[in-house]
Image: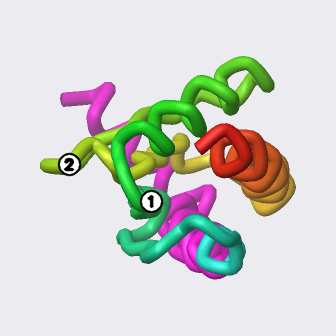
Amino acid sequence: MAAAMATLGVIQDENLMENANTVGAYLRTQLARHPGIHDVRGAGLFIGAELADEAIASRVVNEMRARGVLISSSGPAGNVLKIRPPLIFSREQADILNDTAAAALEVALADG
């Protein structure tokens, strides 16, 4: 119980819920601008970016991994990029993820 209360205290004291909402909204807006992304949805920092098909999503996930950014794909068709960073994720880190996604999409769509 003490550990849970301490965790909740840190979340509140460091405004991590507000950070998740602000940074998440920023990242969703940035991702929605990329060619190849059909839809971006989510809440806070739990984000899904829908691509045309599973093959493209797989190429993007692998290309991002090769560039040092770990995400996964999900959804019934396997075509949604699943992004779940920690609550302390910053706008600067969102920019890194977004730039890496742009480069990975460029490679994946060229290979497609």
Q: Is residue 3 magenta?
A: yes
Give x and y (percent) for residue 108: 65, 42
Tell me the kind of residue under disc 1: Leu
Residue pictured at 43% horizontal, 33% vertical = 72
Q: Residues within 10 Å of mark 1 (few under 14, many from 20)?
A: many
Tell me the kind of residue under disc 2: Ala
3 on left or right of 76: right
Residue pictured at 59% horizontal, 65% vertical = 36
| Residue situated furthest left in the rendering | 76
6 in relation to 67, above or below: below
- The residue pinned by badge 1 equals 51
110 in relation to 33, above or below: above
Residue pictured at 68% horizontal, 32% vertical = 64
Q: Provide the residue span drawn in magenta.
A: 1-29
Quadrant in which residue 112 is drawn? top right
- The residue pinned by badge 2 equals 77
Q: Residues within 10 Å of mark 2 (few under 14, many from 20)?
A: few
* Residues at circles 2 and 1 in contact by the CB criterion of under 8 Å: no
Residue pictured at 48% horizontal, 59% vertical = 45
Front residue of 102 and 10: 102
Q: Is residue 20 magenta?
A: yes
Circle 1 — which element?
loop
Closer to the chain start, of discs 2 and 1, is 1
Q: How many marks?
A: 2
Give x and y (percent) for residue 51: 44, 59
| Residue situated furthest top in the rendering | 66
Image disc number at residue 87: none
Give x and y (percent) for residue 76: 13, 49
27 on left or right of 86: right
39 in relation to 82, above or below: below
Circle 2 — which element?
loop
